[in-house]
Image: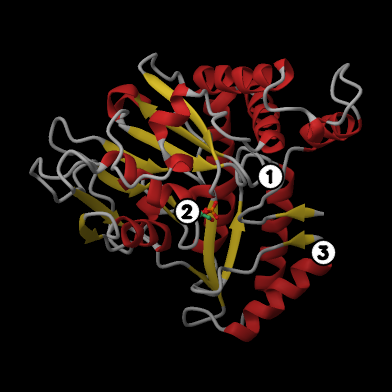
Amino acid sequence: FSYFSPGPAKIPDEVLSGLQEDLLQYKDTHISILEVSHRSKEFTNIIEACEKVVRKLLKVPDNYRMLFMQGGATGQFAAVPLNLLARTGKADYIITGTWSEKAAKEASKFGEVRQVKLDNTEPCKGDKFSPFNDTEASYVYYCSNETVHGVEIQAIPKVPAGVPIVCDMSSNFFTRPVDVAKFGMIYGGAQKNIGTPGTTLVIVREDLLGSPLPSCPAILDYTLLDKNKSVYNTPATFPTHVMKEVLEWVSRHGGVEEMERRCIQKSSLLYSIIDQSNSFYSTQVHPTKRSRVNVVFRVGAGGGNEATEKKFVDEAMQQGLLSLKGHRSVGGIRASLYNAITLDDTRRLAHFMETFLKENYS
Ligand code: PLP
């Protein structure tokens, strides 16, 4: 079987088999990893090792702190303004799809939010796509990969000096190198490329700590969590362990540079079938913004039709190609090609797409 879920997503087989052992007994503790105390030396070692591998993979500069938080990426939609809005009370949001839109909506509960919506059928304008040219915003926010719409923003927005950029990288975290120094903060939920739901990785520049809004709850307070090394309260111990294991797997397999090469190879395979299908397969996303990790498309002449798409999903499932149905808000098909999806998985899907095209194109 090949599992193309958008998240919770496939975990590399090599990691899964190690986890089976840890679930029965973790190292020489005589207890399961699920039972290990968050105050124990074993968990301290896990969180420190996880931080170490993150720093190595993304070459994180020393003036950035790492937080392991709960509440998912959605928790960050509130945490970001609660921690970073104090300077001016205003923030700018670049809207490219569902997730940036939800983040902007949440932020507007805490301050003044300016929004600009980008047209995903238009080409990406290099790094000049941020229309805000003043320093009124406490930060500029965007989402580097819109999981629902299959839109990936390759460039980092150009913003006025001194305005930090905040980025939701949930669905393309660790699928490519990132110049962390260009950001004030980046974050991502674990359940796509780096593990299982329950923990969210936040990497924040240290000068942005120290000024949460007075109403910021303790559980979302970056400054408090940083002071307590992410164990202010009981953290998501097992998901943190899984994250460490998955990231060490990424490191063993060539790091984020190799993950990027694989993502380009896998997604190009599917996009080339889409482009050569005489519009039987179609996508509205401009080629410069096509996601390398969530390939979203319609099936059927004239922009797709639901009956043909249902047939596609059903027949794919019979062949062991699972979880290809698009998000309910946009319909169609979505193939998520996160790091644990192999080239062989992708080739099987490509082969199925070619056969389905031959059998159903009229
Ligand atoms: N941001 C992006 C880009 C996502 O893909 C998702 C979930 O799919 C979220 C945020 C929300 O994440 P969570 O369900 O962990 O709150």
Quote the CA–CA distance across marks 3 and 2.
34 Å
Instruction: Spot the residue most to the front.
Output: 214
Q: Tell me which label, 2 or 1, sits earlier in the chain.
A: 2
Numbered circle sitting on residue 341:
1
Would you name the residue on which mark 2 appears?
Answer: 74
Of circles 2 and 1, which is in front? 2
Numbered disc 3: secondary structure:
loop
Of circles 3 and 2, which is in front? 2
Category of crowding for the residue at label 1, using alpha-carbon neighbours closer than 10 angstroms: few (below 14), some (14–19), many (at least 20)? many
Q: Amino acid at mark 2?
A: Thr
In terms of depth relative to the viewer, which is nearer, 313 or 163?
Answer: 163
Residue that appears at 78% across and 67% down: 317
Point out the image quarter for the N terminus: bottom right
Residue contact at pointers 3 and 2, CB within 8 angstroms: no
Q: Amino acid at mark 3?
A: Gln
Q: Is mark 3 within 8 Å of ligand 1?
A: no
Would you name the residue on which mark 3 appears?
Answer: 319
